[in-house]
Every structure is written in C-alpha cells, then in structure tokens.
Image (cartoon, rainbow, N blue to C red):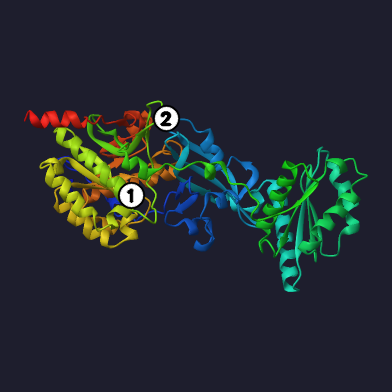
Amino acid sequence: MAAKRQGPMGLFKGASRLPRKSQAAVSRPSIAGVLYAWDMVTDTLTWGPGAAEALGLSSRDLPKTGQAFAQLIEPGCGLARQDAIAAAEPPHRAYETRYALRLEPDRVVMIEDAGRWHPDVQGRPAFARGQLRVDPASGARDLLPARLKERSALLCGIQDAINEAVRVSQTCTLVVGAFDGDEADQMAEIARHVRPMMRRHDLFAALGPNRFALALTCCAAADVAGAMHRLHGLLQDHPAGPSLRLGAACAPDHTFKATKLLRFAEQALAAATERNEASALYKPRSAKPTRIAEQTPFDWIAALNDRSLTLACQPMVDAQTRAPMLAHACASVAGADGRITPLGPAPTLQEANVPLLVDGRMLELAADHLARNPDQRLALPVSSRTLQDAEWLPMLAAHLGARPGIEARLVLEIPEIALVQCRRNLGRLHAMKALGIGIALTGYGAGHVPPAHLRVLPIDLLKIDGVFIQPLKRSTDDRLHVRTLVDRAQHMGIAIAAEWVDDEATARLLAAWGVDYLQGGLFGEPETVVQPSPLQQMLKKARG
C-alpha cells in the first residue's frame, strides 16, 4: 500500500487506496484539451503543451494574441470567446462556447472553448484561463455545412489566384461587396453585371444572400480605387446599386494568404459601412484599439506603495467530510463599493520584477496571519518569475525565521510550468522544502512535467488544473483524464486536490475517485483577511 507523503505541516495523513493494476500501468493519455491563458489587458495569448500539434499548426503559426486568434474564427459560425466572456456572469465567471476555426483555406474545425475569467479592480474581464477541444469529425469536408464548403472553395480559388499572381510578379486584389436585400436571384443578376470587368483568371463568388467576393488578378493597389469605382458604375442601374458598399485588400501588398486577404477585405468593408462611404481599401494601421486594449491597467506598483493589496482566502475542504483543511490565499484589492476583487497574475515590467514584489507582500501578510491564528493553514501561490529571482529564498527564510512555528502551516503553490521554464527551480524547491514548508504543484494535468519526474519532486500536494474540472459533467474525455491523474497520484502516494469545484455532482464524483481536497465556489468565495491596524499591533506587543 502506498502511503501518502507526510508533510511537515501534518496535513496529509492516512494511506492511499490500493492502485488498480489495470490503471496503475496505464501510460499517460493525450491531453484532454489545448490549454491557454489570455491576458486580456495586454492581449497576450499563452498556449499549453501540445497546442500546435492539436490544432495542426506550426509553433510559429500559433496566434500570439487574442486578436490574432479571433481573426481565425469563421464569421457567423458560433460565439467568439470574447463574446462568451462578456456574457458570463459572477460569481464563478465561467464561460463555454462553440465556434468554427479556419486554419487553412480548405481546413475548418469546430472548437469547444470553455474556461473562467478573472476581473480587474473595476470588475472588467482582465485574465482568462481555459481549454480548447477540437472536434476531429468536424474536419471532414463532407460533414461541413454548405456555407463553409462554399467559403472553402472560394478561399482555395483566391489562394490559387494569389499564387499565380506572385508567380508572374503581379498582384491580386479581392473586393468584397454588400448590399441591402437578400433575394437569392439578385446574386446571379449581379454576377451578370460584373462579368464585363472580369478577366480569364478572375473569380466571382457569393459570400451570402447579400454579400459577394470578386478576385481580380493583375490589379495593383494603385488601381483598386478605380476598379471599385467601375464596379459601382456597372451596378448603378441594379436595384442593389444605391446600397452597395465595397471593401478591398491586395496580395501580396497586405498578405500572401487567402484567409487573411478575405478577412482584410471584410474589415475594409466594415470600415466603409461604418463611415457611410461607398468603398474603402484595407489599411493595416487604421484599426481601432479594442475596448480591452483601451482600458487602464491596474497599477500594481501604486497598490504596493500604498499597501492597498490585501490577502483574500478561499476554503479548501476535505473531500469526504467537507471540513475546512486549509485556505487558498491570493492577492486582492477593495473596490470603491467595498467589494473585494481577487487579482490575477501580476505583470512583468522591464523596470521591476512585479511578481516578486507582489509575492513578497502576500508572504508578509500570510506570515502575519498564521502567526496571529495558530489554528490556521494557508496555501500561498508563488509565480514562476518569483522562483527565478535570487531574492526570493532569503526573503522566505527571513519571514519564517521572524515567526517561528508557522512553516508547518504554510503551503507554497508552485505552477507546474515553472519546472519547465527554469531547471534551477527544482533545486530551489528542495531549498524551500528544507525550511519546513509544504509544497503544492498547481496546474497539474497540463503535461508540462512528465509523470516519471513527479517521483523526484519534493511535493506534498498535486492540484488538478480547474480547466479539467469545470467540464467534468459533460465531457467524457475530461473524466477519463482526471481519473487517470488521480490514480497516478494515489499510486505515487501524493495527496491531490481539485479547483473550480462549483456544484455538488462534481464534488461527489471527485470524492468517489479519491481526490483528497476540493476548492471552489461550492465551498465559499474568497474573503478578505482583516489586518489589524499598526496601532493595534503596537498595543498587543506592549501588553506582552
């Protein structure tokens, strides 16, 4: 029987269940989904392991920003992630959506996107974590809706026109038009009116009941305005002529890819419609910043200087008895209405290692709280950047040395990705463990650390990433993945916890599988820890 590792805090007691022979030898399955983290203020999109392979892209082609990813979503084929986040409501801020993602001119896949967002100090979405799941059957061309098949055929034709234009050192211009009305026979009539200006390799196709695309080979960017003016002239006698709006983009001036060329032409059309102009040519630098980019980011430095950051704690309970075992601590700030807002990851600035400053402040508050409350246990997250800083270990040792006895009740949560970003972090884990604290590995299940390496890590607790817990009720893949993670942890004698547990059915399922600790909205939301005033602290010391 594999006994649970006995941490210095005396938290992980008892023995694990006997591992099933059929499951103990099971090799690691493929990741249940593609993990991502989206900083919505800077628009930075970070992918988990295996993202490029799952999406069928090269690592270079993976979108690095939320805006770049949104541009891959097929219009009218599902709710985009940002719109799903806008529709999600507190307290859990969970979102779930499904949409079509076009990865190549002739390759479209359906995506299931689910996760959870975190607010900024104003309560606006600022950070999101989630996972994508690719529907493998959706990539079959025969199963695609007729609209997507038609668009794929158009994009393949556009790509051929671009390739031919580049081969003979020419250009290819794509014009997208829209007009009022949606009668099916109008498109055939418009095609007849447009035919006089088309050459042999030009292409006309319908994008919808009132939208069309016209690919013009050997049409340079300088001639686009004249071409759109002529197009308006050809359609001036048509009933749709007065309402016609045109947008255009050029290859290779703007891009070599058909998918981007069509998207740029549609953006130019949207700009013309917004400005009530007859036509517009795509301008790469004319796009307006999004609402998220316009919002003022939270000033971490000012919050540190005025000591407005507070400690908020969320209970983590025993999965069987539901008794509180320890509290998950995080940085938070009080809003103008007095409501506490837990904050997401601290940004990294060139002039300062903000994560280290924030983690240092939270460590100070956590150490004070443990010293005042000898019956409390805290789990405190530490960022990857903090672990890499040479000042962290002396800072940790100083706080523990100033408050003897709290180390047995303090658990530091280390992100799994930290062991990939810097190999030296493994040695620092051993150094922290030598100080007498407990160590938890968070984000477990993403695949950053091979299962064989877990045996050599000085950890007391594995916390399964919440992106795998949230969809348990509806996803067979996630249930299989989480069950395998639990069995592996039990086989190695390591305690295991699950986050984002928001409903009773999920809690019971995890408890039946052998998960030791649960954390989520079902057991309470984060609440601020009231800090005594400096005067109260002085009086307490004076009274002995």
- On screen, 353 above or below 307? below
Judged left or right of residue 160, residue 189 is right
Residue 481 horizontal/vertical position (percent): 38, 47
Q: Residues within 10 Å of mark 1 (few under 14, many from 20)?
A: many
**Secondary element at tag 2:** loop
Instruction: Please name which of the two marks, 1 or 2, marks the residue nearer to the observer.
Output: 1
Tell me the kind of residue under disc 2. Pro
- Residue depicted at 31% across the width and 45% down the height: 358
Tell me which numbered mark, 1 or 2, is placed earlier along the sequence: 2
Please, which residue is most extreme toward the left here?
544
- On screen, 373 above or below 102? above
- Residue depicted at 39% across the width and 30% down the height: 335
- Residue depicted at 81% across the width and 42% down the height: 179
Numbered disc total: 2
Q: Which residue does the numbered mark 2 point to in the structure image?
A: 91
Residue 94 horizontal/vertical position (percent): 45, 36
**Secondary element at tag 1:** helix
Query: Along the line of sight, which residue is nearer the eye, 540 or 452?
Result: 540
Judged left or right of residue 136, residue 285 is right
Marks 1 and 2 sit apart, C-alpha to C-alpha, by: 26 Å
CB within 8 Å, label 1 to label 2: no
Query: Along the line of sight, which residue is nearer the eye, 53 or 441?
Result: 441
Residue 33 horizontal/vertical position (percent): 45, 49
Q: Which residue does the numbered mark 1 point to in the structure image?
A: 355
